[in-house]
């Protein structure tokens, strides 16, 4: 059995039930994806999962703060001690600590009283010593309204909120370091992603698919990828920009046209927002001016979870979530449309004028 803990702050009433149900469903599907069965109960404040799955899988389910493989007992102190003794008999240890938590406040002993009672039994029965600071083994007890759980391991979950609970986001994924990290952070905050990649070549597309495989390991289901031809998207625009002597605007238009196309697709698939891996001022093209200019492409919210992160911070997350190596595996792609002196500080008024020359009233490239 696995005792699953989640953050309860801000979770009240209906919201809480909704959260718990979604977490339950996600855990079930997550385990099922790998071929494991599970049976889940939701007593107040915890999820209790009976399963044949290795517990490591729980480390990738958003919404889980921490979890412990556990055994169940009744609320009777002797019964609790019997289970604890079973566990302790398997270990070679000298010092111990009991860490009880009374989740059900109706229980007739406080957490402290449980610690003392069980502690005394271990001392007298097994002749071991208490060490609160640095025990060889730390036995946890959680008291629910009709039963208790006993464990000695505690593992971190990824935190966040259950995958998909916020709704659909169309995520622009490039195969670089940033957009997979941005994808992860949006998934962590409950976004249900569909990926959109503008393909420049096969090698990068394969990398994008591998990155999606890694990201999918944090989701309870498969995540769709939509592939569009980047050259096709840019060809017309670049031709047109050449004619009006605006080739320096190519990069701003590249992002603008990606967002514009993304908006069309988002509306088709009922996504509420678009996600990107942009970080303010990270590269010459991600100035606030450029971002503001590109943003004219859509009225949908564009979510940029990396906006305030430094490159080092982004790379650290990439390493932690397992996307870094894959992201840097294919190098040397140079955009064929890159102008010699791209605009790095797009003045919105100027950009607006050029938009009018490139796109007609209907918003299609003229
Ligand atoms: P990344 O590391 O994600 O590639 P970057 O630092 O290289 O980002 P840009 O090339 O300016 O920055 O891209 C900014 C964002 O635009 C990307 O994070 C991604 O969301 C989106 N994007 C860029 N290229 C593509 C592409 N070919 N297909 C889909 N989205 C893209
Ligand atoms: Mg990139």
Image: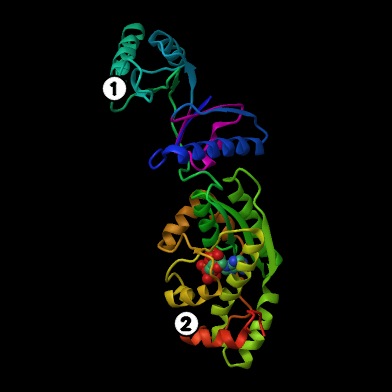
Q: Residue at x 55, y 39 (%)?
A: 22
- Please check the rendered image and state whether residue 313 is part of the magenta-colored stretch, yes or no: no
Q: Is residue 195 rendered to the left or right of residue 304?
A: right
Task: Write down the quadrant of residue 171 in the picture.
Answer: bottom right
Name the quarter where the C terminus is drawn: bottom right
Tag count: 2
Q: Is residue 171 rendered to the left or right of residue 149?
A: right
Q: Is residue 243 above or below residue 270?
A: below
Q: Is mark 2 within 8 Å of ligand 1?
A: no
Percent x, y of residue 340: 55, 85
Residue at numbered disc 2: 346
Q: Earlier in the sequence, mark 2 or mark 1?
A: 1
Q: Residue at x 43, y 9 (%)?
A: 79
Percent x, y of residue 25: 58, 37
Residue at numbered disc 1: 131
- Please check the rendered image and state whether residue 56 is part of the magenta-colored stretch, yes or no: yes
């Amino acid at each position: 059995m696995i005792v699953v803990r989640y953050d309860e702050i801000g979770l009240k009433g209906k919201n809480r039930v909704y959260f718990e149900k979604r977490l339950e469903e996600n855990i079930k599907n997550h385990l099922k994806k790998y071929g494991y069965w599970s049976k889940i109960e939701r007593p107040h404040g915890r999820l209790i999962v009976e399963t044949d799955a290795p517990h490591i899988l729980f480390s990738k389910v958003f919404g889980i703060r921490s979890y412990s493989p556990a055994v169940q007992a009744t609320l009777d102190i002797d019964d609790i001690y019997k289970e604890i003794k079973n566990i302790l008999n398997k270990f070679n240890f000298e010092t111990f600590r009991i860490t009880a938590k009374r989740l059900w406040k109706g229980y007739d002993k406080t957490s402290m009283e449980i610690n003392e009672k069980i502690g005394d039994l271990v001392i007298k029965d097994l002749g071991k010593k208490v060490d609160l600071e640095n025990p060889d083994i730390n036995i946890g007890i959680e008291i629910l309204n009709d039963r208790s759980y006993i464990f000695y391991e505690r593992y971190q979950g990824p935190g966040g909120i259950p995958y998909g609970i916020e709704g659909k986001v169309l995520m622009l994924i490039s195969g670089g370091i940033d957009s997979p990290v941005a994808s992860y952070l949006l998934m962590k905050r409950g976004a249900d992603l569909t990926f959109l990649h503008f393909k420049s070549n096969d090698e990068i597309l394969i990398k994008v698919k591998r990155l999606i495989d890694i990201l999918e390991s944090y989701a309870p289901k498969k995540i769709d990828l939509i592939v569009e031809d980047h050259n096709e998207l840019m060809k017309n625009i670049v031709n047109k920009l050449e004619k009006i002597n605006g080739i320096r605007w190519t990069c701003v238009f590249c992002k603008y046209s990606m967002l514009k196309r993304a908006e069309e697709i988002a509306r088709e698939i009922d996504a509420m927002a678009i996600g990107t891996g942009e970080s303010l001022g990270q590269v010459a093209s991600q100035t606030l001016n450029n971002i503001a200019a590109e943003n004219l492409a859509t009225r949908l919210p564009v979510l940029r979870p990396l906006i305030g992160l430094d490159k080092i911070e982004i790379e650290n997350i990439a390493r932690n979530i397992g996307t870094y190596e894959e992201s840097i595996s294919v190098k040397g792609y140079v955009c064929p449309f890159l102008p010699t002196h791209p605009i790095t500080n797009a003045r919105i008024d100027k950009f607006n004028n050029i938009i009018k020359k490139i796109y007609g009233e209907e918003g299609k490239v003229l």
